[in-house]
Amino acid sequence: MPYYERDAKAIAKLHSELGKIGLPLVRVRKLNGILNAIEMQVEDEFVNREVVDALFAALLLAVESLNASGVQDFMRHVEECRSSTAKRLSMRAVGGR
């Protein structure tokens, strides 16, 4: 079974960026839960594109509700990750890696 390390590392970077915001632990745990779900979807060949899109949308909604410095930068990172992940998933769908 193929493991898509590049996609997993992209999500790991979001985990790291999230830690820089300085949110209370309970908020970080909730957002990490969504990030973990995204990572589980994109790291192997059994990916459901609609689920990935919904999880990224959920992450953005959860982040938008936060009132903390650094949130806008994190949202920019999420959007970049979402876009690059979508491109890689499209490449996978046509047989690329």
Image (cartoon, rainbow, N blue to C red):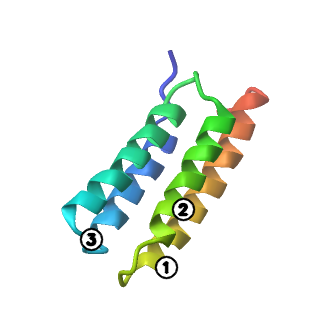
Horizontally, residue 66 falls left or right of residue 81, namely left
Q: Which residue is mark 3?
A: 23
In the image, is residue 51 above or below residue 33?
above
Looking at the image, tell me whether mark 3 or mark 1 is earlier in sequence order. Answer: 3
The three-letter amino acid code for the residue at tag 2 is Leu
Mark in front: 1 vs 2: 2
Q: Residue 51, percent across and down?
A: 61, 36
Q: Which residue is mark 1?
A: 72
In the image, is residue 61 above or below residue 93?
below
Q: CA distance from mark 1 to mark 2?
A: 11 Å
In the image, is residue 95 above or below residue 63?
above
**What residue appears at the point 54 percent right and 53 percent down from the top-left corner?**
58
Q: Residue 42, percent across and down?
A: 53, 36
Q: Which mark is residue 48?
A: none
Q: Nearer the viewer, residue 3 or 28?
A: 28
**What residue appears at the point 37 percent right and 50 percent down from the top-left corner?**
12
Element at label 1: helix
Horizontally, residue 24 falls left or right of residue 85, namely left
Label 1: how many Cα within 10 Å (few below 14, some 14–19, many 20+): some
Please state the total of marks drawn on the protein image.
3
